[in-house]
Image: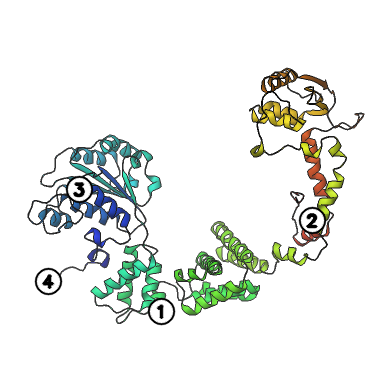
Amino acid sequence: MSDSYQVLARKYRPQTFQDLLGQDVLVETLKNAIEKKRIPHAILLTGVRGIGKTTTARIISRALNCVGKDGKGSETIHPCGDCQPCVDILNERHLDVIEMDAASRTSVDDIRRVIEAAYYKPSSARYKIQIIDEVHMLTKQAFNALLKTLEEPPEYTKFIFATTELNRVPDTIISRCVRFDLKRFDINTLKDLLKRTCDQESIKIENDALMVLAQGANGSARDGQSLLERAISLSPGTIMGESVRTMMGLSGQGDILDTLHGILKGETAVVLKKFETLYQNGADPDQVLSSLCDLVHEISCLKISPSFAERTLLSAKELETLKAHAQVLSVPVLTRLWQVLTKGRDDLKNALTPVQAMDMILIRACFLSDLPTAQSVISSLANLKSPIAALSDSAEKKNSELEKIVPKKETLSPPSTIKKIPVQSAPKSFSDLVELFEANKEPLLKYELENHVHLEKYAPDTATFEIISTPDIVDGFQRKLKENLDKWTGLSWSIKVIKRKKTMTSETDEKPIFTLRDQKNKNKFDLMATAKKTLLVKKTLETFEGSELKDVKPLKD
């Protein structure tokens, strides 16, 4: 009777640290820890599926329990693989190396058994190793039960945890472990691994097929070997790139490319007909949208750098088509299309009839392809005669009268530029005086000065000023104002406060008066009113229906 078949992922599982690919940091750290006898009592291995977390845990178990061929060895980074502990651990039958699948044993009772076993001395090994796979699946109560033992385990017990979802592991557990983040395999490493596997199995494979398999594995060695296993079963002879693409469902990318090409040209009828054909052939609407998003992403990346072509799963001919699109399309057009397609996927999930929703999404995408971008509109108006400069000059003229009330030099600076006024001196301007309250952390008084006070007179030489306040001024404002200013400047201030019964800008007032906040807002409103009269802004608002002017700032020299 022949031996039972073993899948490639198990048959070629790494046996030593030298076999581990792409995990140099982990290997170097453990090597130094073993050599210096600083072996952690708990290790946490995290990373995506199929990169060797459980395999690494088993290698660590052998490294800690190997006794060498002569039976006199100690912990080593190079387990011999021939001694009894190495052989038993390799065959998953060692009594002192206990593996637990937390996905199926999640309760606190399961963890209690782990804790009880941890306090029994190993029967034959140097260390008792507790390996808990998918540790994030444990319940909250199970994690809590493990905390004390994990923090202070017996010296002969080591814990090794593995997880694909680190965010679900409590911080109290993570902080008690030495954590290793296992990296995804890059494409070249996966290609080498798959090529070596094919050589060991005496399988012939094209380089193009290796590339597609490596990219389709998405950084996982196990996924890559599983895909290779399918490809071997599919191809009786040499594994060809085209057959691998067909196996992975990539052979229909040409139709998706044609659909994208129609969207970019705004050929709505052609696009709808192409989708109808895809749908009749069994394509799912969401999958079509996902494939379109992938193509837009590929084109955008190719536009930034041609080196991104190394990551694509497309054939050489399809890649050339994407490069041609990347040369023609602008980044704003691509990002706008990306937003429409990704938003369409959300709409598709809530649609009563996905096919109809898909038609509307494609119609929307085709329609948007004809719209100009904001940059193109601005560029078309570039021949206008200094519209922004005219705006700045006009705004400055409009504000000249108000600047007599609150001079331009007294405009409040942003908080990042505020400087503390030195003691024994009066602020040179009223706005500097207001900044003094910001610098000395008196936000309430600063708010009152900005929003409920109009300056009538300010004389820093004599430390006096006169202000008009609104009826809403806070109680005790004048007293608090004087106390703080006297303390901060070392001067005795004379402050006169006139309370108005009406609001600051009432039409019945004898003359209009403004707070610092009023002045700031009026400057903004005048700038916006002036801006709306310029040809540039008018044309822009007319071109983009529903658009609004939110803010305007004058240009500085």
2 or 3: mark nearer the eye:
2
Taking the image as drawn, is residue 277 in sight?
no
Q: Is residue 440 above or below residue 294?
A: above
Could you tell me the amino acid type at mark 3? Ile
Q: CA distance from mark 3 to mark 4?
A: 32 Å
Q: Is residue 436 above or below residue 215?
A: above
Residue 300 figure quarter: bottom right
Q: Badge 1, how many Cα within 10 Å: few under 14, some, many 20+?
A: some
Q: Badge 4, how many Cα within 10 Å: few under 14, some, many 20+?
A: few
Could you tell me the amino acid type at mark 4? Met
Q: Badge 2, how many Cα within 10 Å: few under 14, some, many 20+?
A: some
Q: Badge 3, how many Cα within 10 Å: few under 14, some, many 20+?
A: some
Please provide percent x and percent y for residue 283: 49, 70
* Residue receiving disc 3: 98
Could you tell me the amino acid type at mark 2? Ile
Q: CA distance from mark 4 to mark 1?
A: 37 Å
Mark positioned earlier in the residue sequence (2 or 4): 4
Q: CA distance from mark 2 to mark 3?
A: 74 Å
Mark positioned earlier in the residue sequence (4 or 1): 4
Could you tell me the amino acid type at mark 1? Glu
* Residue receiving disc 2: 388
Check if mark 1's residue and mark 2's residue have beta carbons within 8 Å: no
* Residue receiving disc 1: 242
Q: Is residue 90 above or below residue 195?
A: above
* Residue receiving disc 4: 1
> Which residue is nearer to you in this view: 505 or 546?
505
